[in-house]
Amino acid sequence: MNKFNNKNAMFKIIVYTFILMMCLYFGASVCYCADLSDPPESVFDYDSKGKRDPFVPLIGQERAMSASLDKIVSPEDLKLEGIATVAGAKRIAIINGQMVKDNDKFGVIIIKNVLRDRVELSIEGADYTLTLQESEKTNADDKK
């Protein structure tokens, strides 16, 4: 009876080894045959509808964010949407949906100074001041 158990155990080992080898062989064949040179297309494309994409980080995106301000040539095309004070009493303004700070340059626009309620800038050497609308100032003062 002991001989039978040894043969049975040996048979199982051989069968399992064969199955494992076949899985490895066919698995490697499938991976080898797959064309991995073309990346898959994006499954989901977010449409921001003119607003900031929440899936894009705010930090480290300066080049991508500056694209629309680069095309501005007139102060009438600019809208100051908000001003925030960050660490170290530095201020950041949001103009046309993009964050800007002192000495930033976007095409012909130079941000000279971000103040509590306005932004001083120059466009092609001419100085301009953008101010917050009264409703925006009131909301910002209420939050203090």
Image (cartoon, rainbow, N blue to C red):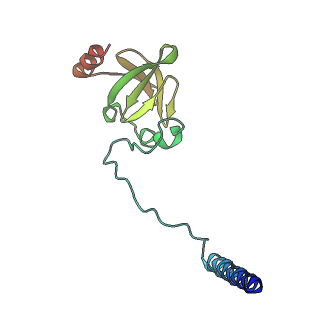
Q: Residue at x 26, y 15 (%)?
A: 142
Query: Which quadrant of the view contains residue 96?
Result: top left
Whether residue 6 sits left or right of residue 45 in the image: it is right
Q: Is residue 36 above or below residue 133?
A: below
Q: How many marks?
A: 0
Q: Residue at x 51, y 67 (%)?
A: 40
115 vs 126, nearest the viewer:
115
Q: Residue at x 61, y 71 (%)?
A: 37
Q: Residue at x 40, y 59 (%)?
A: 44
Name, please, the residue furthest toward the front.
1
What quarter of the picture does the N terminus occupy?
bottom right
Q: Is residue 83 above or below residue 21?
A: above
Query: Which quadrant of the view contains residue 19?
Result: bottom right
Residue 36, how many percent across, how many down?
60, 71
Whether residue 98 sits left or right of residue 76 in the image: it is right
Name, please, the residue furthest toward the left.
135
Whether residue 90 sits left or right of residue 32 in the image: it is left
Q: Is residue 31 above or below residue 58?
A: below
138 vs 54, nearest the viewer:
54
Residue 135, how many percent across, how many down?
22, 21
Residue 18, how many percent across, how many down?
70, 83
72 vs 42, nearest the viewer:
42
What quarter of the picture does the C terminus occupy?
top left
59 vs 68, nearest the viewer:
59
